Amino acid sequence: MITSLNELKELADKKKCTDDNSRQELRVCMGSSCMSLGSAELGKSLQDELQSRELNDRYKIKSVGCSGLCANGTLVSHCNGNESTLYEKITTSDAKDLVDSIQNGGLLKDKMCDIAQPFFAKQTKIVLENAGMIDPDEIEDYIAHGGYIALFKALDEMTPKEVIEEVKISALRGRGGGGYPAGIKWESVSKVISEQKYIICNGDEGDPGAFMDRAVMESDPHRVLEGMAIAGYACGANKGYIYVRAEYPLAVEKLSRAIKQATKLGILGENIAHSNFSFSIEIRLGAGAFVCGEATALIASVEGNRGNPRQKPPHLTDYGLWGKPTVLNNVETLANIAPIIKNGGAWYKNIGTQNSSGTKVFALTGHIKNTGLVEVPMGTTLRELIYEIGGGIPDGKRFKAIQSGGPSGGCIPEELLDLHVDYESLKNAGSIMGSGGLIVIDDSSNMVEIARFFMDFCRSESCGKCTPCRVGTTELTLLLDKFIKKEATKSDFELLKEMCEVLKSASLCGLGQTAPNPVLSTIKYFESEYLEGIGDD
C-alpha cells in the first residue's frame, strides 16, 4: 500500500534503478492496430528467439502501447540505456534477423524507421507522452514515469479549490468536441451541495476513422484513472465510471487491470494516502450507439436505460447520473489533468493558441501516407498536418478536402489548407473540432457521395426520439441519392438546403443539430458537384 507522496517517489526510484541496471528492451507495440498485424505473435517469436539463444538475461521483450505510425506497423523499438532505434513493418519472419542484429551490435537497416522525420519531430506529446514507452499492464512502470505524482501532490499540497483554479488557469477545453472549459465545469459541480457526486469518463468513441481515445485507454490507462481521481478530489465526488464501448475489448482489458492494480496499492479506494478522500472507479460497457456520445444519452445508458437524450436544462452539473451532480469529461480531457497539476496551469496555457490552449490528439486517416495517431499544439495548420506530419497524398493523387469532426463535422477544401486548427477556426470554416478524427479526401472522391455517407451514418445512428432527426436524416439521405444519380431538380437543391437548416434548429440533441454539417460544408465549397447532379427539368 502506498500512503504518501514520498512512498510513491521511492517506488518510482526503485523501478528506475532496476530498469537502469537490467536488460536491454525490445519494445513491441501491442495496440489494436499492430495487434491486427500480428504483433502478439511477433512478440512470442522474438521471445522464443531470445530463449533459444539463452539471451533472456540480456534482453527483455516489453509490450507497449501505440507509437502512432500505424501505417508502418508493427513497430519495434530497441532500447539500450538512453539509446533507441525504431524499426517498422516488422513481422514474425523478421524476428531472427532482428535478434541477429542486436546481438551483434548492428542494425537491421532495411527496417529502420527515421525518428527525425516530421511525423515524429513535429509532434508535442503530453497526452501521448507514455505511449510506446511504458507497459500499460504494469502500474510500477507508470509510476516510474511520474505516474500518480500529480494525484498525491493534489492530496498533500493543494485544496480542491486550488486544483480547480489550476485547471481554470490552463484554459483546458473539453476534448470530446464541445470545447467547454473543463475548469468551469468542475467548479460548477464543486459548488453544488450534495452527499453524492459522480465523475464519468466518456470513452464511447463512435466517429468513423477516430481511434484517439481507444489508443490512450490501451496505451496509458493509469493516466485516465489519475485524471478521474483528481477530478473527484476537486469536485467532491467519491465515485467514477468509465463508459467505453464493448467493441474496444483491449481497452476494457487494460482499464480493468489498471483499476485492480491501483486499488491494490491504495491509490484508489478508501482514504487515499491517509486523507479524507475516497474514490473508486467502475467500467460500464456501451453497445456502440453513436448517440450515446451525447451527454444525457450516455447518462441514460450508464443507468441501464435506453440511450436517449433528454431536454436540457437541467444540466449534468446539477442533475446528472441518478439525479446527482456529475462531471462528464472525455478520455483525452482527463489525460491532460495530471500534467497540468504537475507542471502548473500557466505551463499548459502557453502551449497552443490564445483561445485553444494545449495540444490536440488527431487520428489521421483516409487518403494519406502516414495514417496514424499524432499530437500537435493547437494552432498547427492543416497543411503541416497533411503534408509534413502526414506525408502527403499517396498514389500521385491530389488533395481535395479534409473532413474533421466525424459525422458532425464538415469538409474543408484546399484553399483553406493554411487554416490554423483550433475550435474557433474550424467552426468559422463550417466544421468542428469533434473528438479529433481527420479524414483526408483525394481528388478521386465525389463530395456529394461523401456527404451522403455521413448523413446515412447519422440516419442509422439516430435514436428516433425527435421527429426532425428521425425523419430529417432519412429524407436528406434519399434526397442526396437523387443528386448522385443525377436525377435531382433545382427545387431539390433548395429543399436540400432548407431541410438542413430545419434539422439544425429543431433537433433535440447534438446528433441531429450537427448532422447537416457535411452537407452544408460541401455545398459551400463544392457546389458545382451538386449542380452536376441536377438533371433536365
Image: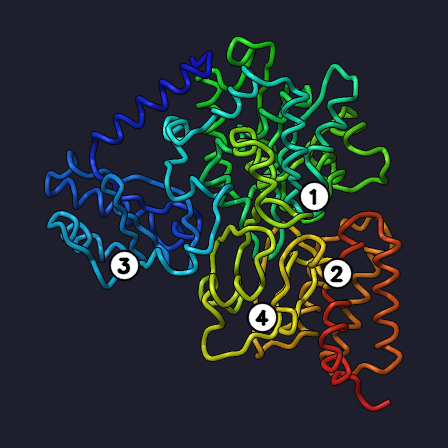
Which residue, given by chain and number where applicable, does mark 4 sit on? 441
Question: Callout 1, which amino acid?
Answer: Cys
- Taking 440 as reference, is 218 left or right? left
Q: Secondary structure at mark 3?
A: loop
Mark carried by residue 112: 3
Q: CA distance from mark 2 to mark 4?
A: 20 Å
Are the residues at dot 2 and dot 4 in contact (C-beta closer than 8 Å)? no
Q: Residues within 10 Å of mark 3 (few under 14, many from 20)?
A: some
Q: Secondary structure at mark 2?
A: helix
Which residue is painted at 76% across and 72% down in the image?
524
Question: Callout 4, which amino acid?
Answer: Ile
Q: The C terminus appears in which quarter of the rendering?
A: bottom right
Q: CA distance from mark 2 to mark 3?
A: 42 Å
Answer with mark 1 or mark 2, whichever residue precedes in sequence: 1
Quadrant of the rendered image containing residue 280: top right
Which residue is painted at 25% across and 47% down in the image?
78
- 255 relative to 82, above or below: above
Which residue, given by chain and number where applicable, does mark 2 sit on? 428
Q: Nearer the viewer, residue 338 or 290?
A: 338
- 125 relative to 235, above or below: below
Are the residues at dot 2 and dot 3 in contact (C-beta closer than 8 Å)? no
Q: Secondary structure at mark 1?
A: helix
Q: Residues within 10 Å of mark 1 (few under 14, many from 20)?
A: many
* Residue 408 place in picture, x, y as percent: 71, 57
* Residue 340 place in picture, x, y as percent: 56, 33
Which residue is painted at 75% across and 26% down in the image?
189
Answer with mark 3 or mark 1, whichever residue precedes in sequence: 3
Q: CA distance from mark 3 to mark 1?
A: 42 Å
Q: Nearer the viewer, residue 380 or 518?
A: 380
Which residue, given by chain and number where applicable, does mark 1 sit on? 292
